[in-house]
Amino acid sequence: MSKTILKLDRIIQGNCIEVLDTFPAASVDMVFADPPYNLQLRQELWRPNRTKVDGVDNDWDQFDSFTEYDDFTRQWLSACRRVLKDTGTLWVIGTYHNIYRVGALIQDLGFWILNDIVWIKTNPMPNFRGVRFTNAHETLIWAQKKKGARYTFNHHSMKALNDDLQMRSDWLLPLCTGQERIKIDGKKAHPTQKPEALLYRVITASTNPGDVVLDPFFGSGTTGVAAKRLHRRWIGIESNPDYIQIAKDRIASIADTAFSVTTFASQQRASTLKRIPFGRLLECNLLSPGQALYFEGKDTPQAVILANSHIRCDSLEGSIHQVASKLHNAPSNGWKCWYYLDEESGKRIVIDNLRNKIRLEKEI
């Protein structure tokens, strides 16, 4: 592979440290890394009903010592730093097993930490032995390559995704379950598959359409799925051929939608369990940027959904409530006003049904 040309929207099989050495310097806008957590599991885990927990016991998560893990971490972080643009940012996710070691190395290598994000899982795996607190969160570190450089943060998009409230650093999102969790013969295809909602939020926050997103531990391809949905370019590195095939199939299943500047342009401009922001419907892939919304009884689309979860009708732009109120010239509840076209039934369905679907899944 030439160091002068970076081919995009593809998965490269290999060791990420070796593969990244072939990339041109300063060629990607953002890195999302979900590295091995070094869980240090030494025994099998069992539930009270004597069924085995499908935990992470793969070879790629095995390290002989902290020193070996630190050396590995330093190498891949250095390789990512070289290929990041000066304006680029790095996201790394981990648990208490590794995130503090990773965080120290991030600082040692010259990155500047912008935020740490706590992903609070609404449906964490219980601690079956009852000897510790249930691990109900993971931590994401967001850092820029060069302190003081201009970096992308779509503040208004994050606010819009959160029902026009400033988004906090604690993100309440469920684990992969149900149809989103990929299984083969009844078993998890990948032990640490991340929810699409998490990557949708990360990529929306810190990149713009057309930016290049790199994932050096591509796994089952969630980063590529979210990047494609959001019209970002992407490149993944993965050593396991089985994971690569899963990722290819997932990404290929995402329909190619025509890029519309108006759909994505607003990204450049300026809780409780019961409250569901409209943006959650996009993060959960229940609705998509560019999709049309209708008023009841109207055969023609009245608005289009933007990637930041605002909607636009001609020159009007705002939340589902703001646009509905302006069109009705009266206060309006957008959840009850707007309908989407269900492709399977061919019928128009009120978007409030989708909000209730998320609520029901949170309660289960």
Image (spheres, helix red, strand yellow):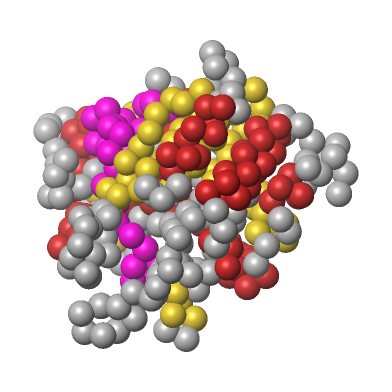
Task: Report the front residue among 115 and 70.
Answer: 70
Q: Residue at x 21, y 84 (%)?
A: 49
Q: Is residue 230 left or right of residue 286?
A: right
- Residue 313 to residue 199: above or below: above
Task: Report the front residue among 71 and 329.
Answer: 71
Q: Residue at x 26, y 85 (%)?
A: 50
The percent position of residue 277, horizontal first and vertical second, equals: 24, 43
Task: Report the front residue among 247 and 69.
Answer: 69
Residue 327 in which image quadrant: top left
Task: Report the front residue among 295 and 103.
Answer: 103
- Residue 5 to residue 314: above or below: below
Q: Residue furthest top?
A: 148
Residue 174 covered by magenta stretch: yes
Q: Would residue 204 be seen by someone viewing this image from the given angle?
A: no
The percent position of residue 316, horizontal first and vertical second, equals: 34, 29
Q: Is residue 133 left or right of residue 77?
A: left
Residue 330 in which image quadrant: top left
The percent position of residue 279, horizontal first and vertical second, equals: 31, 44
The percent position of residue 287, horizontal first and vertical second, equals: 37, 54
Q: Would residue 61 be seen by someone viewing this image from the given angle?
A: yes
Residue 336 covered by magenta stretch: no
Q: Residue at x 14, y 44 (%)?
A: 272
Residues drawn in magenta: 152-180
Q: Quadrant of the C terminus?
A: bottom left
Q: Is residue 234 left or right of residue 351?
A: right
